Image (cartoon, helix red, strand yellow):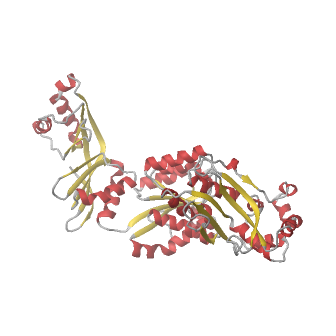
């Protein structure tokens, strides 16, 4: 047999790939306890001058596999058919199968115990060995796998047993404010992270809505110019194919788009060995059927999907709620200011002698709002965030079931964006009336609230403008911070409170970055 690739050596460890081999499988009813079967196999091979690399008996004792050179594959199969012709006649042997699209990865200097970490890493990369052979004593592990997985498998094993930096190959979809900021954060921090954590972050693909750039060894600081000048038309399959062609391991797809269409690619990415990180809320707020299908794909492929920034930008909210729920803590109610934009608007409008339109214009000037501020004032974004938290508690609510107080008067809903921005003053009278009608010492807050019997299939979800005491936890909110109150049976009337920056590209990008590192 020819050794096509010898990946790495050390004093007592090395990894070899042998790909001019074939797997011969003798498949039958039950080989457990059958005396002489192995002897007959080896005798048949010896009589035909065929060398056997190793033999492994199937876990259910229904088959025996042996590895031989590819040039001897058909002779070996014919020899076994002849040797077991009586068993074929008695229906005790079903088939002798030949697979030449396999390779053997041989790992020296590893016992079965020390190889477990490498095996887990292989499975994490959707590489499942067909057969594994090891000696009870000794330091050699061999495994058979698909030929097109061999190089990627050797990379995964190499990083584990030689304690090299683990290479995380990242595809970033979307280069708006969050996506662009994230790329710069990764490029700026990559060297330091590799030195301290032995994790090498490698951005191999960057895309906008139409174009993509690829680099197996990672993009550089000039990625913007490269995307603009030499970006290629692409579809998501092109990214998947590039990763497969270049045998890239530890794959992460990062969705920084706001596209409803893009999330349809999530399952194909998962099935192609990608973990997912997303600042895009849409996948978690589509119909519950899709939500369940996505989770099933993640479970089946043993992949992870992290989206901490979906609700609280960089705040550890989803993680906290998930841990509380997983630990058996009964969460009874969640309430909070979910929107950094609306937090800024009502924090300032409530305490300053300014018209509502003036505060809104300030928020627009600071870049806190969407290009059309009605996207913020409609409450739909808060509703999506609230639904995400509900589903973290395994509630089956749909977006249509949320009661949402839309802050835009009906007469302004029909305006174009330009017309709306030119007539912000039409908002003033209504909001001033609401402000004046409050009790003394109160302030306005636009909140999302999850309540009801949260042990049932569905909860009560409301998005609304409320008046609270200026001395309360919600009432003391400042700037554009978000705040969340999590009420549980154990904590009683004293909620767990999470508060911090709820908006901004840098904060959100840093949260996405954190999710990538958690996967690493």
Q: Is residue 384 left or right of residue 518?
A: right
Q: Viewer-proximal residue, 261 or 236?
A: 261
> Residue 354: image x %, image y %?
84, 75
Q: Viewer-proximal residue, 272 or 336?
A: 336
Q: Is residue 210 left or right of residue 445?
A: left
- Farthest residue in the top direction? 89
- Residue at the spot 55% in from the left edge and 65% down from the top edge: 512
> Residue 313: image x %, image y %?
61, 66
- Residue at the spot 83% in from the left edge and 55% down from the top edge: 413
Q: Viewer-proximal residue, 314 or 253?
A: 314
Q: Viewer-proximal residue, 396 or 313?
A: 396
When the figure is inspected, residue 49 is found, relative to residue 148, above or below; the finding is above
Q: Is residue 55 visible?
A: yes
- Residue at the spot 56% in from the left edge and 54% down from the top edge: 393
**Quadrant occupied by the C terminus:** bottom left
Q: Is residue 148 left or right of residue 94?
A: right
When the figure is inspected, residue 81 is found, relative to residue 18, above or below; the finding is above
Residue 74 figure quarter: top left
When the figure is inspected, residue 16 is found, relative to residue 191, above or below; the finding is above
Residue 96 figure quarter: top left
> Residue 480: image x %, image y %?
69, 72
> Residue 451: image x %, image y %?
65, 55
Q: How many marks?
A: 0
Q: Is residue 345 visible?
A: no
């Amino acid at each position: 047999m020819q050794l096509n690739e010898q990946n790495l050596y050390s004093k007592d460890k090395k990894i070899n790939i042998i790909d001019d081999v074939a797997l011969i499988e003798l498949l039958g009813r039950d080989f457990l306890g059958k005396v002489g079967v192995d002897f007959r196999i080896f005798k048949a091979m010896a009589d035909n001058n065929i060398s056997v690399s190793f033999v492994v008996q199937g876990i259910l004792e229904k088959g025996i596999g042996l590895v031989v050179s590819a040039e001897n594959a058909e002779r070996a199969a014919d020899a076994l058919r002849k040797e077991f012709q009586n068993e074929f006649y008695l229906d005790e042997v079903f088939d002798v199968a030949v697979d030449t699209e396999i390779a053997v990865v041989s790992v020296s200097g590893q016992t079965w115990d020390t190889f477990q970490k490498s095996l887990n890493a292989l499975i994490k990369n959707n590489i499942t060995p067909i057969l594994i052979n090891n000696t009870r004593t000794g330091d050699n592990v061999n495994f058979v796998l698909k030929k097109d997985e061999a190089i990627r498998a050797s990379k995964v094993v190499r990083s584990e047993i030689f304690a090299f930096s683990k290479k995380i190959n990242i595809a970033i979809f979307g280069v708006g404010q969050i996506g662009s900021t994230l790329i710069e954060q990764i490029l700026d921090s990559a060297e330091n992270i590799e030195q301290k954590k032995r994790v090498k972050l490698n951005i191999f693909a960057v895309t906008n809505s139409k174009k993509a750039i690829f680099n197996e060894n990672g993009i550089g600081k000039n990625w913007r110019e490269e995307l603009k000048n030499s970006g290629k038309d692409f579809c998501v399959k092109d990214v998947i194919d590039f990763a497969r062609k270049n045998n890239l391991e530890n794959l992460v797809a990062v969705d920084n788009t706001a596209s409803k269409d893009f999330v349809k690619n999530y399952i194909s990415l998962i099935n192609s060995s990608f973990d997912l990180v997303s600042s895009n809320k849409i996948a978690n707020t589509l119909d519950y059927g899709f939500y369940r299908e996505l989770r099933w794909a993640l479970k089946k492929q043993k992949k992870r999907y992290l989206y901490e920034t979906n609700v609280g930008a960089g705040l550890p909210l989803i993680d906290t709620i998930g841990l509380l729920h997983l630990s058996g803590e009964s969460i009874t109610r969640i309430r909070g200011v979910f929107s950094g934009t609306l937090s800024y608007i009502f924090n300032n409008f409530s305490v300053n002698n300014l018209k509502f339109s003036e505060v809104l214009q300030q928020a627009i000037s600071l870049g806190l709002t969407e290009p059309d501020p009605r996207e913020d004032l409609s409450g739909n974004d808060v509703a999506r965030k609230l639904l995400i938290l509900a589903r973290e508690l395994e509630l089956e609510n749909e977006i249509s079931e949320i009661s949402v107080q839309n802050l835009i008067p009906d007469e302004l809903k029909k305006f174009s964006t330009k017309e709306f921005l030119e007539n912000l003053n039409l908002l003033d009278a209504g909001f001033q009336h609401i402000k004046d009608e409050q009790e003394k010492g109160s302030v306005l807050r636009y909140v999302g609230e999850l309540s009801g019997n949260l042990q049932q299939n569905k909860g009560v979800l409301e998005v609304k403008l409320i008046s609270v005491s200026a001395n309360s936890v919600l009432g003391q909110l400042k700037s554009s911070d978000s705040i969340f109150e999590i009420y549980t049976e154990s904590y009683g009337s004293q909620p767990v409170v999470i508060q911090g920056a709820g908006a901004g590209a840098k904060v959100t990008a840093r949260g996405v970055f954190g999710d990538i590192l958690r996967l690493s």
